[in-house]
Image: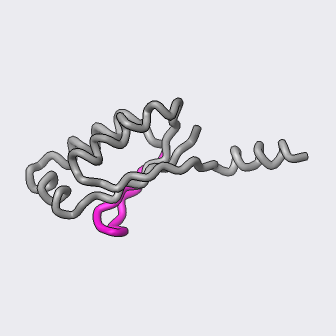
Amino acid sequence: MRMMMKARMDTQMSNQVTKGGAMPDSLKSAIEQLKPEAAYFTPEGGRSMILVFDMEDSSQLPSIADPFFQEMGAEVTFEPVMNLDDLQRGLAALK
């Protein structure tokens, strides 16, 4: 299932990770693990990241979110999302 993950990182904790030089490795690790179709970085609410990726099973939630909780004190949310093709298939099923 296509998921959108938003991670809003705690400013103080993410400052420490950034100053310590670990931020690039942390982000690279998340990108390599999830292989997102899209990745966005924004200052919304502080340091924030939005990833759109395929989640095979809900049991993946802890392994995806926990590094952000532990390393950056992040607030992490997940939301199922669709692209245009998904929406068109869904709408066609209503007929």
Q: Residue at x 10, y 56 (%)?
A: 19
Is residue 46 highlighted in magenta?
yes
The picture places residue 43, in percent across and down from the top left corner, at 32, 67
The picture places residue 59, in percent across and down from the top left corner, at 46, 31
Q: Residue at x 83, y 42 (%)?
A: 93
In the picture, measured across the screen, residue 81 lies left or right of residue 60, that is: right
> Can you name the residue that lies furthest to the right here?
95
- Name the quadrant containing residue 1: top right
The picture places residue 60, in percent across and down from the top left corner, at 43, 32
Judging depth in this view, the residue of 32 and 48 nearest the camera is 48
Q: Residue at x 37, y 37 (%)?
A: 62
In the picture, measured across the screen, residue 42 lies left or right of residue 80, that is: left
Vertical position of residue 35 compared to residue 79: above or below = above
Q: How is the image coloured?
A: one colour
Judging depth in this view, the residue of 53 and 79 nearest the camera is 79
Magenta-drawn segment: 37-49
Judging depth in this view, the residue of 15 and 73 nearest the camera is 73
- Name the quadrant containing residue 31: top left
Q: Residue at x 36, y 43 (%)?
A: 65
Count all numbered tags in the image, as a single digit: 0
Judging depth in this view, the residue of 15 and 85 nearest the camera is 15
Vertical position of residue 29 compared to residue 71: above or below = above
The picture places residue 3, in percent across and down from the top left corner, at 53, 45
Is residue 83 highlighted in magenta?
no
